Amino acid sequence: MSKTIIISNRLPLQLKIENHKIEATPSVGGLATGMKSVHRDGNGVWIGWTGLTEEEIPADLVDDVVEATIQEQCVPVSLNQDDIDGFYYGFSNRTIWPLFHYFIEYAEFEKESWQSYKRVNEKYAEVVLDNIEEGDTVWVHDYQLMLLPALIKKERPDVQIGFFLHIPFPSYEVFRILPWREEILKGLLGSDLIGFHTYDYQRHFLSSVSRILRHEVSFNEITLKDRMITVNSFPMGIDYKKFADAAEKHDTAKNQSELQRRLDLHIDSTPDAKMILSIDRLDYSKGIANRIRAYEYFLEKYPQFKEKVRLVMLAVPSRSNVPQYQLLKKEVDELVGRINGKFASVSWTPIWYFYRSMPFENLIDLYTTCEVALLTPIRDGMNLVAKEYIATRTNKTGVLILSEMAGAAQEMSEAVIINPNNFEEIADALKLAIEMPEDEQIKRNKFLQKRLKRYNVEKWAEDFMNALYETTHKSDIVEAVRMQREREDQMLEDYKKAKKRILFLDYDGTLRAFVNNPDDASPDDELIELVRKIESQENTEVVIISGRDRHTLGEWWQDVPITLIAEHGVWKRPIGGEWAVTEALRNDWMETVKPILEKFVDRTAGTFIEEKNYSLAWHYRNADPDLGEKRASELSTVLKELSANNELGVLDGNKVLEIKDSTIHKGKAATKHIFDKNYDFKFAIGDDWTDEYMFQDLPEDTYSIKVGLQKTAARFYVDDTDRVRDLLKRFADN
């Protein structure tokens, strides 16, 4: 039975060694809850680190650790202390974490940490590959394992792989700072589906793929030579029922916690006062220091709220061995002390500060008691605390103030959204929240709760898995069938039996891979010899049919006795003959169009004009990918409007727009060439939309082949120019 393999840095377990025995306790909340339906309720296996290093596990307990994890449907990855120092505390949290959260000044780029990151990803890959069976699905989680998808796909291309990033993906301008940017992107592109919390992160990732790797990106799909990758946003939810039910029970609980008693004492002593809640891990991305300063500014700007508000601040310890976190704790401690010293009275302390982890029950105490939640991260992938707070407000009162830099802000527009760097705005938001009428609070929270309840963490996991399943059918949109060995053998058999054969071969992107400078794409000796060998076979004709100008094409193939068709069918040179125009054409329109193209060249760095006898081409392969596509769309619109009342047409090729007489194209040239000739084997191959005319117009029994995975009128497709070369070698050997 096929299964889902979930992979994350840590297993959803807490392992302890007590009295020389292993004790495993399942984790609750967060990812463990979201993946429950996939992992425990389904036929799932979870792979990850146990939390114990090799040095911490006695040799005679190694097997017990493995057995304890297997009992929980998990498989452990064994890591030593060097791995944790270099991979986790090093590259993951001193390079990726600060860079992806825009704290560039904290990012370290150490080669040793990168090597450790690669090594540990390879360790995970070994364990995953040992556990994969045919039909399995893989779901990889988060920034610690960004190389893993490609490592798995390399060995098991048949396996469907999903990846989800739980932190922000930065803009291209920030991401390109990373020395190993290409390796990270290639690692992620081993996935079939890549998920992010928000559309912004998705957009940043696609931009980096397009600009750095130069892959074709269309909407939310990346086209590789042999497959398509889907990129989408899936905003992670919470276990809404768990928090809502806990809040309901809390309201009727008889045995109150010590924390709740202290909170109630504050309420009884100052019934009109409001409590403002702040809960975060102690991380520089959370904006805690700024939040305290903004609270100080609020008390100064609106002194009427002194002794009528209290900031209840919980900072959960995090990565306390990292220098930046140690400095942050020192800064927060000093700020809290200074502000309490500045504003406190005998009966009032403006900030209650807790630096500790709190059990779930105490979190519910805070969520249900505090009338305002103030969450101001500088950068945050999602921020589930915001969602948890709203879920616990069972009477629908309470006000959420949320940073626009948190991923959750895009779903929670009814909250009071603020810029975390704008103290004026935060102070005004606090005043608004404190004074907000109950009916307004209820109105806002009613919408928020309805949305959060509907799109909970299980729905998030379900949507991702459904989207991953759909990627298995992605190739259905390509009508062509992959040219596999059996079909290739049948084609070669038909080729051998044929009494008269013809092969139409496109050039750029088919016989030769694209290069930055088109003049550097001349045929190599092997290609020339292959074509010469095929042409020399009895009753076999080779036609190179290209968008190239006749002078370049003629010079490259001057010594090879083949037919050449240039400029998409405008010019033709038969074997042993001279170049001739296939039809009477005008080119007086070029004087009007060329200045338009020149303006686009001036505005778009890296583009240039190719001037032919009867057409003009605007090349944008070397332009910035995003800008190039936008300019191409803009230019195409201008040219089509210009040519609406005449017979000019715009060909949208591979990173090139060409304007020419619309009555001439490759399909017309190819069918005209074979007219009244009895070819019983016909072959046509090309890579872009200019070749679609040829695929459409040639007879149905033609072996038409598209280079690349795209929607096409061709019957078959191959991955790339290397496969084209393989096919030519087989023709030549026959």
Image: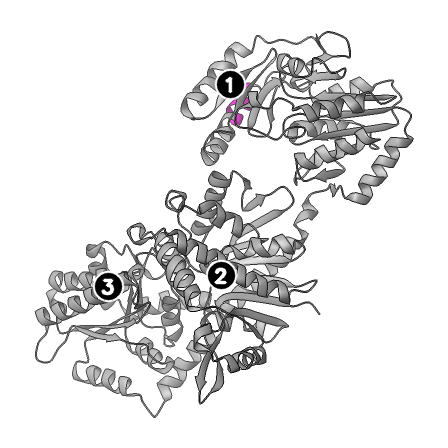
Q: Helix, strand, or loop for circle 1?
A: strand
Q: Residue at x 44, y 80 (%)?
A: 245
Q: Helix, strand, or loop for circle 3?
A: helix
Of badges 3 and 2, nearer the viewer stands: 2
The residue singled out by tag 2 in the image is: 120
- How far across and how far down the image is residue 688, in percent? 64, 31
Is 729 placed above or below 568 here? below
Give the magenta part as a residue range: 636-642
- How far across and how far down the image is residue 571, in percent? 69, 13
Give the mark nearest the N terminus, 1 or 3: 3
Question: Identity of the amino acid at label 3?
Answer: Leu
Question: Identity of the amino acid at label 1?
Answer: Ile
The residue singled out by tag 1 in the image is: 609
Quarter of the N terminus within the rendering = bottom right
- Distance from label 2 to label 1 (Cα)? 49 Å
Image disc number at residue 73:
none
Left/right of residue 637 with respect to residue 349 in the rendered view:
right
Question: Identity of the amino acid at label 2?
Answer: Val
Quarter of the C terminus within the rendering = top right
- Distance from label 3 to label 2 (Cα)? 29 Å
Residue 340, picture quadrant: bottom left
The residue singled out by tag 3 in the image is: 328
Main secondary structure found in the magenta portion: helix
Is 549 placed above or below 241 here? above
